[in-house]
Image (cartoon, coloured by chain):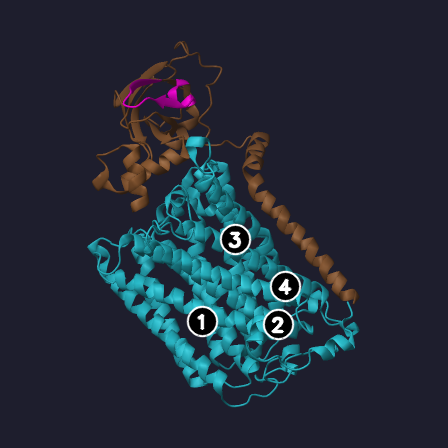
Chain colours: A cyan, B brown
Amino acid sequence: MSIATIAPGHESEHRGTPQGWRRWLFSTNHKDIGTLYLVVSLIMLFLGGAMSMLIRAELFMPGIQLLEPDFFNNLVTNHALILVFGAVMPAAAGMGNWMIPMMIGAPDMALPRMNNMSFWFLVAAAVMLVVSMTVPFLPGGGTMVNTGWTLYPPLSVQVGMSMDFLIFTVHLLGISSILASINIIVTILNCRAPGMTLMKMPIFCWSWLITAFLLILIMPPFAGGVTMLLFDRHFGTSFFNAAGGGDPVLFQHLFWFFGHPEVYVLLLPSMGILAHIIPTFSRKPLFGYHSTVGAMVAVGAMGMLVWAHHQYTIGMSLAAVTYFMIATILISIPVGLMVFNYIATMWRGAMTFETPMLFAVGIILMFSFGGLTGVMLATVPGDIQYHDSYFVVAHFHYALIAGALLGLYAGTFFWLPKWTGHMYDEKLGKIFFWMVIIGHNLTFFPQHFLGLAGMPRRVVDYNVMFTEFNMISSIGAFIFGASHLLFLYIIVKTVRGGAKPSEKVWEGASGLEWTLPSPPPFHTFTTPPAIK
Amino acid sequence: MGNEKKNRRTALLFGGVVVAMFGFGFAIAPLYSLYCKLTGVQSVSNTSSTGESSVKADGAGAVNRLVTVKFDANVTNGLPWEFKPLVRKLVVRLGEDVEAKFTAHNLAHETIVGQAIPNVVPWQATQYFNKTECFCFREQALQAGESREMTVRFLVSPNLPEGINSLTLSYTFMNRDVQSAKKFEQISAHPEKKQTVQPESAITTGQSS
């Protein structure tokens, strides 16, 4: 366990920052790899976001104005895949890379070379995903992936070779996140500074530990599922082909066995970030540390056992749907516990509302709302009505934007001064926050009504009776999209310069990472810190 | 450095978990059927049930309750067949042995092997719908241009829950051969060339598009 045993000769070899492209390509430094992850996720955020702008522009009016139906469905598919796998997961991984070693007092990640490998696998996957999008435009490229991100057969067996590239994308992404997860688990289990017991560990590390465990449990079966898809497409097997005795529903089970815990993979790191932001700006320690950890473990464990609530309409037996309904609704208990702990932390605190705190409060409100519609969707009779409607779209955007994406924005503003050594522009940060909140709610709130009125998801055209709400939704989306140009500006401006923050940055901050200078030196905690 | 050794051991341990979970993905279907068999959880998609022993196929167990059975026939994109029921619907007595006929016609200039997949709507009635003989029990090969009548014999169990007065028996014929299915799918994807259902032209169409 002792980290002080690092050989001094080895240490001196690597002193100082490697220069040029070698610094990044061959990097084994957790801070550099964290930065790389964050940069890639920012690029992917803009790519996936641009797709949603096209989608909302097409849906501004009924009729088909801008996009071919196949291309529209392709955009819907890739919008989801890029933002889930390209933006949110890498951003969380980048923050994990940056912060976990600094929070637990470790000199670096436990397996630095594997860390480098998992990042470059991600880049390879991103390239493969772009290839999958472009091949249909080349001669002989076949049809586009138009299945939605769920990739259900039989449609996914029929589309052209872009599906094969997508399957390889999933394989690469799987390898990348499995390697990153193993690295994080090993780091947290083996490299904590002496005296930092698991139950003294910062919540962000706990949230990543649970996330990493989820990932190594769910990614392999999903990789297996898409491998079966590949075999059905090219090698004449019949895993999902009914004519050969297979069953397309098997893929749905494999997909959602991955897909549902994936929701918690996206959510938990952001919830971990909130557990640092809220105490900092309430100037109180986190209320109920133990129960928050327990709630996160419970969410992760229960999240593994509820996947079929995405499949109520496939004709499961009554016993099965009843179980999945009850188990799903039970998850709202630990999630609620987490949220109430955060609210209790704010209770009678000396609160100030800098940008990270504004995001934290906004997340609690909007994510709880997404959780509420989640309970509606968990009930079988309700879900059979809402299934595949815009109500579902509204629900999961409330859960994923508020629950995952905004948590990462909060984390960005919270830690950006620490990473860069420059204070961001508070006024611009607040403008960004309000644009995001207004844009997000204007986009997704009317979609609840659209769904209840019967508008199906993944359609390029719709009945004229849905026009008004769709227009409101599109205007909201354009505000939401435009706000991100401001986000980019704030980040670039902060990286280039700004007021120098203190070591602590925030008055109420506590934890090992805030004892380091801002920005932290290339190597930190080469001798383990003393834990009080 | 002892720490490095320990890290490697922990990483390998969780690498083992990853490999095990990859295997679990492939084992999920057999495990699920084993679970259903052991616990008796009914599987709705159980289409191979051969009927309950209490009901005799000669109609001795018939009761005086009538239900309408509708017939529906489909083919997938990759199968150039015509397939339709000879009768659209029948009113049958519960427990009575009934025969229904479908007709299939191969439009292509080559022998094609098809497999019919049955489906009963509403799904709650599936376990009470017992096929005693069915063309869907085995693969059907049709020569080029051949037509054939296909028979299904079934009985609807007297235990059919109250409230279900109408059933639909739907068949989807699929091309058993993946390569052949791909070929004909490409033809149906280009409707302007649909008239020429000849495999030779199909191949060239597929490559030039």
Which comes before the other along the chain, label 3 or label 4? 4
Residue underneath mark 4: A114
Q: Are marks 2 and 3 on the same chain?
A: yes
Q: Is residue A313 visible?
A: yes
Q: How far apart are marks 2 and 1 (CA)?
A: 30 Å
Residue B159 occupies which quadrant of the picture? top left
Residue underneath mark 3: A171
* Residue situated in front as seen by the camera: A144 or B207: B207
Dot 1 falls on which chain?
A
Which comes before the other along the chain, label 1 or label 3? 3
Residue underneath mark 1: A362
Residue underneath mark 2: A30
The amino acid on which the numbered mark 1 sits, given as a three-letter code, is Gly
- Where residue A162 appears, as percent x and y from the top left, is 40, 52
Label 4 Cα neighbours within 10 Å, binned few <14 / some 14-19 / many ≥20: some
The amino acid on which the numbered mark 4 sits, given as a three-letter code, is Met
Which comes before the other along the chain, label 2 or label 3? 2
Q: Are marks 1 and 4 on the same chain?
A: yes
For mark 2, give the secondary structure.
Answer: helix
Which comes before the other along the chain, label 2 or label 1? 2
Q: Do labels 2 and 1 share a chain?
A: yes
- Where residue A10 appears, as percent x and y from the top left, is 74, 75
